[in-house]
Image (cartoon, coloured by chain):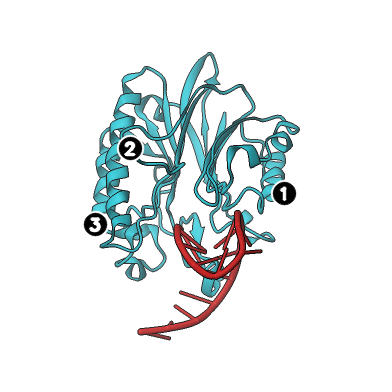
Chain colours: A cyan, B red
Amino acid sequence: MILATWNINGVKARLESALTYLRQQSPDVICFQEIKSVDDGFPTSAFQDIGYNVATNGQKGFNGVAILSKSPLEDVVRGLPGDDADQHARWIEASVPLGDRMVRVVSLYLPNGNPIGTEKFSYKLAWMARMRLRAKQLQQDEMPLVLAGDFNVIPESVDAKRPAAWVNDALFQPESRAAWRTLVNEGFTDATRACHPGPGVYTFWDYQAGAFQKDDGIRIDHILLSSQAADLLVASGIDRATRAQEKPSDHVPVWVKLAG
DNA sequence: ATGGTCGATCGTCGA
C-alpha cells in the first residue's frame, strides 16, 4: 500500500490540488496537515466522492490534521495525550488495514517553535517530549506504526540547501534535532533518509524570495516507521512536482510503499 | 539588514 503525507497549507485553498493529486497518485492513505479548518468546514464529501474515508481533527483558522483512507478508518484518536490544557489540533491517529492485518497511522503537525527563546519554542520541546511518550505507548502494540507529518525539524545539515541560514531557527536548533534523534533512536526508521541517503532531498520551499526556483529547500516532512513497519518498507518518494503547480502549498507530498 | 509571500479572515497572526 501507498501512504502519503502532505502539509497542504489550507484545505479550502488547496482542494482542487489535493483532489487532483489523489486522482493521479491514488495513495491508499494520505495524512494532511495545516488543514486550517474546523471539522464541520472540511470538504469531506468532495473526498468521499473520489473514494476516501475521512477523519479530521480541526480548529478555527490554523493547524488542523486529517487522515484519509480508501479503507475504513478504525479507532480514531484525536489530540496528543499528556496536556489537557493544549488545545492545538496537531495530532490524529487511526488504524487502517494492511494486507491481512492493521497498521496504526498518525498524522502530526509538530509546533514550528519560532522564535527561539520564547514560550513557543518551549512548547515545541514539551510537545516533542509528549510525542515520544505516546509513540512509546503505541510501540507496545503489535501493530506496525507510522508517524507521518510535518515535524518542523531539519534533522541534519544535509537536509537544508543553506544550513547556515537556519542556525537561529527553531527548526534547526540543537535541542530540536536532539529530540528528533532521541525519538528515532527509540526504534524508528526515517523512511525518506533510508531510501534517499544523499543531499538535495527537500520537502518545503518558502513562498518568499524565489526559494523554489533556487531549490533553496529544507526537509522537514517525515515518515517514521516502527521496526514492524520498517520491515515492510519497499520504496519512498517525494512528489516535488506539486510545488511547481499553480497555487501550490509550500510543502510537497512525501510517501512510502509498504508491502501488503 | 530588511523584506520578501501566502492562508484564513477582514486587522493581524502564523508560518
**Same chain? Circles 3 and 1:** yes
Mark 3 or 2, which is nearer the eye?
A: 2
Label of residue A174 in the image: 3
- Can you say whether A35 is above or below A224 in the image? below
Q: In screen coordinates, is A180 left or right of A14?
A: left
| Residue, disc 1 | A16
Q: Amino acid at mark 2?
A: Met
Tell me residue A74's x, y (percent).
53, 20
Q: In screen coordinates, is A141 left or right of A212?
A: left
Q: Is residue A234 visible?
A: yes
Subunit ID for the residue under disc 1: A
Using a 10 Å C-alpha cutoff, classify the residue at mark 1 as few (fewer than 14 neighbours), some (14 to 19) or many (20 or more): few
Tell me residue A210's x, y (percent).
55, 73
Tell me residue A99's x, y (percent).
55, 18
- Can you say whether A212 is above or below A120 in the image? below
Task: Give the mark nearest the N terminus, 3 or 2.
Answer: 2
Label of residue A131 in the image: 2
Badges 3 and 2: C-beta atoms under 8 Å apart?
no
